[in-house]
Amino acid sequence: MGKIVVLGSNSFAGSHLIDCLLSNTGYEIIGISRNDEAPGMFLPYKKNPHIERFRFMKIDFNRDMQQLIQALDSEQPETLINFAAQSEVEPSWKNPADWYRTNVLALVELTNRLKDKKFLKRYIHISSPEIYGACMGNVYEEQASNPSTPYAASKAAGDTFIKLLTKTFNFPAIIIRPTNYYGPGQQLFKIIPRSIIYIKKGKKIPLHSGGIAVKSFLHVKDAAEGVLKIIEHGKTGEIYHLSTTTGYPVKGVVQRICLKMHVHFSEVTENIGERLGQDAVYVINSDKARSLGWKPKISIDEGIADCIRWVEENWEAIKNEPLDYVHQP
């Protein structure tokens, strides 16, 4: 069946995609990340019965480009899926150059070199709908970018270069823009796991502007199946959205968590100031991906229960983990 490389394999979505690929394809999977593999509770593929088809390489996307290219030349994967990015929004205001270094400069160097590799049949780039700014109504893949943060601006710049390579050199790229991932194994500082942990620890959950921002929460397993469907049936040069059809205010998601954990929302939350560059509505149209035979299967309530169960099962390890984002340039 050949080989697939997942760049950014330690990432939340990347690790779940590896698990999905091992379960649903016969490919040999090679994961590449700049850090050692994360603890097993954050890597679902560790328990996959087909783990013998997975190998891991530690290579820094920013600092070891020549080593990365040499590894790709040696392995000659037919598909490369790129999750590697600086992906946090609020911290990007403090160190914007780091976001551009990874999401633009390193990406440009990588893809410019990949365009000449005959072995590569598909380059799948994981982008973000944040490039659109506030998403009002039905936002389709042709929507012009209007970023509100350095993170979003850096992703828009990277996407633009990839589209230029496809237009000029027939680079076999497909861009995917999934909405807000969530699910078991997510970074603990994200709103859903953090809310669960704060409730268990008796701490107040801080909500920007009371949690009024509307987001499309997509279970990470549904996202992985969407990426797989696009690998199998997507068209080179296209952009695909992965999203639910309904958006939820962050407040509403936290209220669901409180209900399932038998606490009162007003007693465990606190209102903090608005996040700089916060987009009020973040819901997009995913009809194009659905035309390939994909659709989300896991409801928000099922997904939240899944997250609570994961925290409970791993509580002894999780309770001692740091809960704040730690920037790694």
Image (spheres, rainbow, N blue to C red):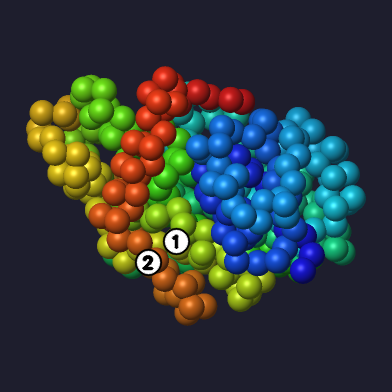
Q: Residue at x 23, y 22 (%)?
A: 203
Q: Amino acid at mark 1?
A: Asp
The residue at which mark 1 appears reads as 222
Indicate the amino acid at tag 2: Lys
Find residue 89 and report its horizontal and vertical position in percent: 44, 36
Residue 219 versus residue 240: which sits nearer the camera?
219
Q: Marks 2 and 1: in contact by CB < 8 Å?
A: yes
| Residue 260 visible in image | yes
Is there any visible trace of residue 273 in the rendered image?
no
In the structure shown, which secondary structural element does the residue marked by tag 2 occupy? loop
Residue 298 is situated, as x and y percent measured from the top left of the image, at: 35, 61
Position of the N terminus, as image quadrant, is bottom right
Mark nearer the N terminus (1 vs 2): 1
Residue that carries the numbered disc 2 in the rendered image: 297
Q: Is residue 290 above or below residue 74?
A: below
- 237 or 9, which is in the foreground? 9
User: In the figure, residue 29 lies in which quadrant?
Assistant: bottom right
Which residue is depicted at the point 50% across and 23% down?
A: 326
Q: Is residue 24 above or below residue 145?
A: below
**Secondary element at image label 1:** helix
- Please state if 118 lies on the left or on the right of 98 as rendered: right
In the image shown, does 134 or 233 lie closer to the viewer?
Answer: 233
